[in-house]
Image (cartoon, rainbow, N blue to C red):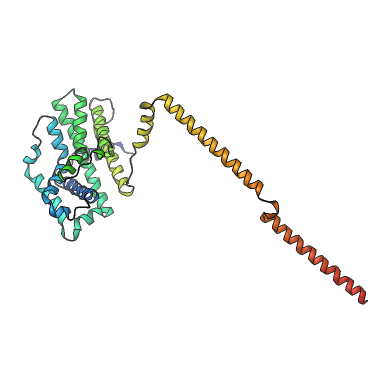
Amino acid sequence: MNKDLFIDVGSQLAHLRMYPVFDTCHYLLTALQVRDDIILHQSGTHNFTRRHPLSCWLSTMLLCFSGSILANFLLGESPIKDFAHHQHLLLATVCWYLVFYSPLDLVARLLRFVPIRILVGVAKEIQRTKKVFDGVHSTLAIYPDGYVVVVMIAAIKGCGGSLMSSIDRFFRGVWLPGQTEFLFPSFATKASFISAIIFVLEHVQLIQFERELVYLCVASMFIYVRVITIFFKQYDPLMPFENISSGILFNSWSETVSEAYRRATAASTTSGTSNTSTQQQAAVIPAALTPLTATTTVISGKKEANNTDGQGKTLEIKKRD
């Protein structure tokens, strides 16, 4: 493969302008996410979006700008700093209105159409990669040696919507403390932290590859998982590694060995019991009732009857003679 081609593609991705196309895709998918969450957790409230439009709008705006709100708060800046640019807030409001109140629910239906959903999802993941990348380098300008802070701020910019989901539901009158992102982190959250670490390692030159190639690989990872998730709802390529690492690092070795021994013993006992029961059943069945024996008995009986009839006919002919 031509390495220069991949470097050129990565460079173009890194220098794409996010406003307005990619930001629009992000706002549309965020509004659709809020709408689906309302249907899932607030189905008992009739016409919630029409009876509580302010709550619905605040919830959507919070998720649309959650990454920058959290990052600015942690960096000691104004959480509403990004609202100074009114065009972003206006664009997010238009996307919110179209998703929730478009005639015939047209926009929401189009966003659920698989080809359009793939295109919009790819654009959102490109924007997520850009947020993490810019978050790393903007935070490095403030904390040149604070790599932990850099990773945390960059990851929050990439997955702020997932981290703010509980507060988002609270704005709509729903409180689900058992479903926070800290208890059940999504792939977007885990991948954002991993991507931030990769960009930091590339910055300190522990990863000896061109920056454009690293950027392209991270963006490709986000896009791949997004496309697969559209077809398979529950897909997390990090889950097998989490299971193995948690079993090794966070479990007692004695408990692990005893549990494995118990399972092996239970499996051998179950197999031995099933073999014994099978042998007993085979012994109870009479041999004369098996299909093969019955068929052989019927055939031999027919042959003996034919032989008897033939001998009787021969004696009758001899007597007549």
Most distant residue in the front direction: 284
Task: Say above or below: 250 vs 85.
Answer: above
Q: Is residue 5 visible?
A: no
Most distant residue in the right direction: 321
User: Picture coordinates of residue 200 (x, y %)?
Assistant: 23, 28
User: Picture coordinates of residue 269 (x, y %)?
Assistant: 54, 36
Question: Where is residue 235, by image quadrant?
Answer: top left
At 27% from the left and 40% from the top, the residue drawn is 222
Q: Nearer the viewer, residue 98 or 287?
A: 287
Q: Nearer the viewer, residue 289 or 104?
A: 289
Q: Where's the C terminus, which quadrant?
A: bottom right
- Number of marks in the rendered image: 0
Q: Left or right? Give the position of 284 relative to 265.
A: right
At 28% from the left and 39% from the top, the residue drawn is 186
Q: Where's the N terminus, which quadrant?
A: top left
Task: Say above or below: 43 vs 280.
Answer: below
User: Picture coordinates of residue 137 (x, y %)?
Assistant: 17, 30
At 13% from the left and 47% from the top, the residue drawn is 55
Most distant residue in the bottom direction: 320
Q: Nearer the viewer, residue 137 or 4?
A: 137
Task: Say above or below: 165 vs 136.
Answer: below
Q: Nearer the viewer, residue 171 or 153?
A: 171
Q: Is residue 303 visible?
A: yes
Question: Where is residue 149, by image quadrant?
Answer: top left
